[in-house]
Image (cartoon, coloured by chain):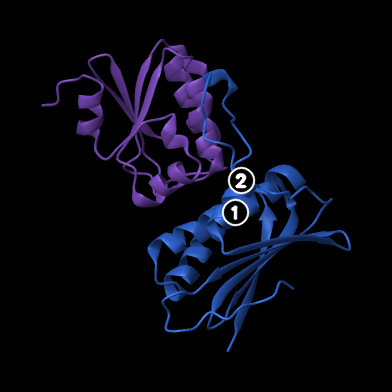
Amino acid sequence: MHRDARHVGDVIIITPAVERIDGEGAGEFKDELLAAVTSGHTRILLDLARVLFIDSMGLAAILSALKQMGDRGDLRVCAPRPEVRSVLELTRLHRVVPVYETRAEALRALGQIVS
Amino acid sequence: MERRIELVVRSTLSDLALVAACVRGVCAEHLVDPSSCAHVELALDEACTNVVRHAHPDDPEHRFSITLCVSPTELEFVIADAAPPYEFGAGRLPPAPAGRRDQLPEGGFGLPLIRATMDLAEYRHERGVNILRLVKRRHGMGTTVPARAPR
């Protein structure tokens, strides 16, 4: 799965560059999230702006990363399209993974200065 | 007038994006609400993924079928797969996640999402075939929605 990753302060922003996170791509998505966790990142912002579709396999990948981070890690989501946000809300994932409309809003919530 | 097509799908995850494209096209043509289209695409994805992952793990030699029926009042999708029965159950979404993160569920969302996103989801096992019937009403298409008893 192609994705972009950049850092703002101690936050790593992961932006999947695929339109679908489903059964076919969820494994790679999960591996990339877990790689960020195991490499020591404790604050992850997942920017889903480019993602048009996510299914239960994609959600499982996010939950897996969240569990791997433990109670002190911070994983948040920003910029989901309405279809993706709907899935996050239907499954109530948004109650454990805060969701923000924009990347800037999420970074502000994470205490980062947004230029 | 009803219109009906049947898709025969290889049991492999890599082909499900093609199914999704077909479903999106049908929904775009026959449903008004974009969120309804997204919900149908999600339900079909979950149903087909279940077939591929659980009944015939990535076995492209195996085929299952999806019958799409468009009527004036609804879209109907019937997924038929020759496989052992499974527990469709109440299929409720897990409770709101709370407490320790290591106790969060990582699975169990598929069937509940199907139920939550479709107007009707019926499962039966008949002569060795799993049959999942999913219905989305065509609200807002200038039609009335009559009550319909399950088949």
Task: Residue B61: give x, y in percent of width and height.
Answer: 75, 52
Position of A42 compared to B67: left or right? left
Q: Chain of mark 2?
A: B
Q: Is residue B57 visible?
A: no
Q: Is residue B106 above or below residue B1?
A: above
Chain coloured blue in this rendering: B
Q: Provide the residue designation for mark 2.
A: B110
Residue B73: image quadrant is bottom right
Residue B149: image quadrant is bottom right
What residue lies at 29% left-to-right and 40% top-to-bottom?
A79
What residue lies at 52% left-to-right and 64% top-to-bottom?
B23
Q: Quadrant of the C terminus of chain B?
A: bottom right
Task: Residue B105: give x, y in percent of width and height.
Answer: 59, 30
Q: CA distance from mark 1 to mark 2?
A: 6 Å
Chain coloured purple in this rendering: A
Task: Residue A78: give x, y in percent of width and height.
Answer: 31, 35
Q: Is residue B67 above or below residue B103?
A: below
Q: Is residue B5 visible?
A: yes
**Kind of element beneath mark 1:** helix
Task: Residue A22: give x, y in percent of width and height.
Answer: 52, 44
Q: Is residue B25 above or below residue B50?
A: below
Q: Amino acid at mark 1?
A: Ile
**Kind of element beneath mark 2:** helix
What residue lies at 49% left-to-right and 23% top-to-bottom?
A65
Q: Provide the residue designation for mark 1.
A: B114
Q: Are discs 1 and 2 located on one and the same chain?
A: yes
